[in-house]
Image (cartoon, grey):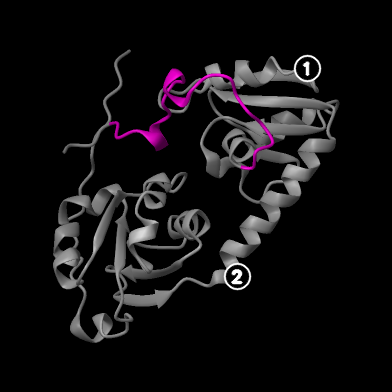
Amino acid sequence: MKTMHVHAKSSLDITIPPDKLMQLPKQKWGVVTTVQHTHKIGTVLKQLESAQLAGQVLGCNATETELVKDKVDAWLFVGSGEFHPIQVAMKTGQDVWLWNPAAQEMGLLDKNIAKKFEAHKRAELLNFMHAKRVGIIVSTKIGQKNLVRALELAKKKDKEYYIFACDELDMRQFENFSFIEFWVNTACPRIADEKTAMVNVDDLIEAGVLALEKENMAYEVPIWKSKMGLGK
């Protein structure tokens, strides 16, 4: 069965009103948004001086912001909610402002939110180090499958590793495997957010806890690290 990835565009006007624009400090900005607003983000860029466009942000990954962070002082996220900008704050350590064009609201993301996520991740990394039996979660969905990386992790001799492959992820089902002390997620990174006894495989790599032998280019590219379905 063929799968079509459709780029859904929003018709919402994302222009920042003058009174909201005045709330932003005079500094160099990086601008990020969701896929729904990428075709209109040029409007916001014209409103900001010295703006650097980091591209669209999927909630599960904000990797592109790391490439630009040394050129900017802060970030402006165009969209709704805190789901996406939290990743930007965690990846860059910089201030993230939120412009919600639907609600016409402008505000600064609370730094304590990102700090909370970071503290939780550090605690889970420590728990991983002490675990002896580890389950590796693999999604069979196109765009989320990362089996190659899971197999590479399973080759390590420091722990007992078990691979669990599934299409629909139901955390309650994992409770049936009580012998597993800890879980490593290779699917969408947001799955591990605020969950106990679970960490993302990329977090292990970034923390230097895990060194994989193969280069990143050798792995299947998950949808949150690709531009699948996006036009230029």
Image quadrant for the C terminus? top left
Q: CA distance from mark 2 to mark 1?
A: 38 Å
Splitting the image into 4 quarters, where does residue 124 fall? top right
The residue at 68%/17% (across/down) is 154
Please state the horizontal and vertical placement of residue 54, each as a whole percent of the image: 30, 52
Magenta portion: prevailing SS class:
loop
- Residue picked out by circle 2: 112
Q: Residues within 10 Å of mark 2 (few under 14, many from 20)?
A: few
Image quadrant for the N terminus? top left
* Direction from residue 125 to residue 45 in the image, left or right: left
Q: Secondary structure at mark 1?
A: loop
Please state the horizontal and vertical placement of residue 23, each as a whole percent of the image: 32, 84
Indicate whether 200 appears above or below 179: below
* Front position in the image: 212 or 105: 212
Labels 2, 1: front one? 1
Splitting the image into 4 quarters, where does residue 80 fall? bottom left
The residue at 38%/59% (across/down) is 70
Indicate whether 62 appears above or below 31: above
Please state the horizontal and vertical placement of residue 12, each as a whole percent of the image: 19, 61
Q: Secondary structure at mark 2?
A: helix
- Residue picked out by circle 1: 157
Task: Report whether residue 149 is seen.
Answer: yes
Q: Which residues are magenta?
A: 207-228
Indicate whether 190 appears above or below 220: below
Which label belongs to residue 232?
none
Mark before the other along the chain sequence, 2 or 1: 2
Splitting the image into 4 quarters, where does residue 209 fall? top right
Q: Residues within 10 Å of mark 1 (few under 14, many from 20)?
A: few
Q: Any magenta on residue 153?
A: no
Q: Any magenta on residue 218?
A: yes
